[in-house]
Amino acid sequence: MPDVLSAPLVVEFPFTRSLGPVQSAFLTGLRERTVLGVRTGDGKVLVPPVEYDPVTAEELRELTEVATTGTVTAWAWNPAPRRDHPLATPFGWVLVKLDGADTALLHVLDAPGPEAVNTGMRVRIRWAPQRTGAITDIACFEPYDGEATAESTPHSGEFADPITGIVTPARLDYTYTPGRAQSAYLNALAEQRIVGERCLSCRKVYVPPRGACPTCGVATAEQVEVGPRGTVTTYCIVNIKAKNAMNDAIEVPYVYAHIALDGAGLALHGRIGGIPYDQVRMGLRVEPVWTEGGRHPDHYRPTGEPDADYDAYKELL
């Protein structure tokens, strides 16, 4: 049996969101070295502030300033920081109830080791030298030997040049292992062949194979070579250019389609080329186009055959 494949993969995108009046005031306040919470109907001060009372769902707008000192209520030690962690050296994850607040804020504590951290220890904010209106304006917490206070004063939430939106990069690094069935499928693609697996119960051929029939739940092992020609079942016209290296050379608009390969019981997707986008249609007969050294079809093009009859592919829509 061929070796099972694996590959490092990264899913990365910027997450953009607008801010309401409460979050806008909170983040703008951090830029100005001011920590704001919001007061609930029963007098509790929530930090970080929220727009609605988590108990009553009442809308909250009464902002209040709390101290930059506080008390650790819970903690965990991180001996091996990872990329994009707030500190490059070992640190503690801490929940800190700032003086004047009734809830705890999650952040990091710069301490020499876990023996220097304990529940109940006093800490204070260390501000980042350059602040932009983000939670990272708090560089970290650091030990503090001052006493606790009940400091909390009303605040208008008004600042010059308020922050109205944020962009947060999201990234997930992981190793993907396709497993036996999909490894065989990918290895066959490298040889310009397309293989699926047949269910022993319903006899459908699934491409790409999943190792088990999604309908019957029966394990599949019988390999079946399909295509390479197929039929467009449905499609969409793409008008927005993707921001990645793979699609840089593809001009919009282009067509992305579901294609039922001959002999397959499941449609797969692929890009349609070699034909104007406004001439692509359901029933169009297509075949794969491979690039030199490519491990999968670059796109599918028309074969010149008559269109397939609707009844021949309607079950695969």
Image (spheres, helix red, strand yellow):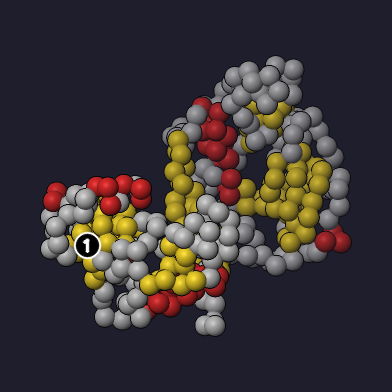
Residue drawn 68% across the image and 49% down it: 107
Q: Is residue 282 left or right of residue 177?
A: left
Secondary structure beneath label 1? strand
Q: Is residue 82 left or right of residue 307?
A: right
Decide if residue 248 is in sight here: no
Three-letter code, disc 1: Val
- Mark 1 crowdedness (10 Å alpha carbons): few <14, some 14-19, many ≥20: many
- The x, y position of residue 182, in whole percent, is 49, 69
Residue drawn 63% across the image and 65% down it: 82
Q: Quadrant of residue 272?
A: bottom left
Image height of 205 relative to 170, above or below = below
Q: Which residue is mark 1?
A: 286
- The x, y position of residue 136, in whole percent, is 58, 49
Q: Quadrant of residue 205?
A: bottom left
Total residue callouts: 1
Decide if residue 71 is in sight here: yes
* In the foreground, 166 or 173: 173
Residue drawn 58% across the image and 40% down it: 30
Q: Is residue 224 left or right of residue 34?
A: left
Image height of 23 relative to 2, above or below = above
- The x, y position of residue 169, in whole percent, is 48, 53
Q: Is residue 97 left or right of residue 34?
A: right
* In the foreground, 12 or 193: 193
